[in-house]
Amino acid sequence: MNAPVLVLKDSLKRESGSKVHHANIQASKAIADIIRTTLGPRSMLKMLLDAAGGIVVTNDGNAILRELDIAHPAAKSMIELSRTQDEEVGDGTTSVIVLAGEMLHVAEAFIDKNYHPTVICRAYHKALEDAIAVLDKISMTIDVKHRSTILGLVKSCIGTKFTSQFGDLIADLAIDATQTVGVDIGQGLREVDIKKYIKVEKVPGGQLEDSEVLKGVMINKDVVAPGKMKRKIVNPRIILLDCPLEYKKGENQTNAELVKEEDWEVLLKMEEEYIENLCMQILKFKPDLVITEKGLSDLACHYLSKAGVSAIRRVRKTDNNRIAKASGAVVVNRPDELQESDVGTGAGLFEVKKIGDEFFAFIVDCKDPKACTVLLRGASKDLLNEVERNLQDAMSVSRNIIKNPKLVPGGGATELTVSATLKQKSSSVEGIEKWPYEAAALAFEAIPRTLAQNCGVNVIRTMTALQGKHANGENAWIGIDGNTGAITDMKEQKIWDAYNVKAQTFKTAIEAACMLLRIDDIVSGIKKKQAPGAGQAQKPKVETEADADGEQILPD
């Protein structure tokens, strides 16, 4: 009677209960340990080899985890964390993983004591609410117009990155770029679209000091007929098109039967006239520069260069939009619909320069450009890639601060304040939730502790001193100077973090920890259901010469 009942197929593996919890916590801690050393100004770089054999050298938490191939499901969801953090606020990708790993680590003790995961989660959520409240209390609002304040903030964000050795350079680039493309949407809000309107062009060669934010756009193109067309135009009138300046070809093979030979000439003439017409419609507006996203035939090129107009063809759509934003032109779909208002006159200079091995067209010195290009120069490709990643982070931070001008102290000071306040509050939490709540408070100390570890100072001494300073939730601005490991006032050192980066970090970390804690069953080995009849059809095996010897003789 009591034969075992098989519910799951043999191929399925099922783990449940505390075994799963431990496995998940172990996996998350492993991920956190990979990137723990990349936190703070004294951070180490990681070198990753990707599938194609390319090298990535970086200490941006998200960039590292993106390259890793990971089998464990819980670890995969940890990686998602840093990705969301990167998309949402652009900075704090490392801290979010370290914090989440720590939250799970302190929860392990409670699971051993048979606490129910939901109890732990409830306590964590309470801790999160209180932590955000503390953030609100200690944050200070700044004036976005003050360049030095924003510079301090962006510098403390990049201070942890590889480019910090170049001082203010990257910070300046980032602030220039974001302030250029910021658009006021009313009610004192500014919208900054980094992705669309800031293009980062990496050109190997030169020194990093040559990098600059152009007051305009540059594209990797030369004029169509380099000998005949001008390569430098001051105050150009720019027309942007997204239609081909050539004779429309038939969709598919078109057969035209001609009876007389003269008809052939008529056909050719029609094509020529069609193109001449197009060009004349454009030349009516006396442009100096015509840029089109599509092709431009030799004939059209001839008409344009005869009129002294430079032309550039096959420009990317995104680049065209940037040029439109920078020069004030409107991208026009058909030449016969051109109006005077569509001509861009905002640019001060068009010129084609040769950098390294390639030609670049610059449209610069614009009046009030709303798009810009950041030109990065540097010794090697890997270096440039790393600089670009850091620049992205820096631009995200300056965008955040323009959108929400609130600062909190950096250098682990915020986390320590939060930790101290939560410890105090934990005595007033009722019932069994008190202990996990207190543990969450301790978990926040992971960030300053990691900072201290990476500086190579005596961790225990430094942490005790800091906890003493923060004991009653006062001295909110005392933290670790990441370079020396000394305990200093963050206000004087100008080490700040953006409020919404910190808030996002806390929220993401705690919610992720709760999610992983609530998993109590992992069923793996689930096969996708195949359509009936699809099971048999394997790939037909193609025989090569190599198989000829070991050929199995098929039974008749």
Image (cartoon, rainbow, N blue to C red):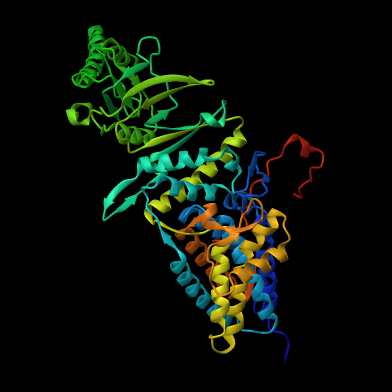
- Residue visible at 54% across and 85% down in the picture: 429
> Residue at the bottom extreme?
1
Residue 340: give x, y in percent of width and height.
Answer: 17, 28
Which is more toward the observer, 8 or 38?
38
> Residue at the right extreme?
549
- Residue visible at 75% across and 34% down in the picture: 545
Residue 219's image quarter?
top left
Whether residue 495 is visible to the viewer of this picture, yes or no, is no
- Residue visible at 76% across and 48% down in the picture: 554
Q: In which quarter of the image is the N terminus?
A: bottom right
Residue 58's image quarter?
top right
Residue 323: give x, y in percent of width and height.
Answer: 34, 32
Looking at the image, residue 252 sits to the left or right of residue 151; the answer is left
Looking at the image, residue 386 sits to the left or right of residue 332; the answer is right
Residue 94's image quarter?
bottom right
> Residue at the top extreme?
261
Image position of 523 with respect to 250: above or below: below
Which is more toward the observer, 97 or 523?
97
Residue 30: give x, y in percent of width and height.
Answer: 69, 61
Image position of 453 with respect to 277: above or below: below
Image position of 274 with respect to 488: above or below: above
Whether residue 504 is visible to the viewer of this picture, yes or no, is yes
Residue 189: give x, y in percent of width and height.
Answer: 31, 54
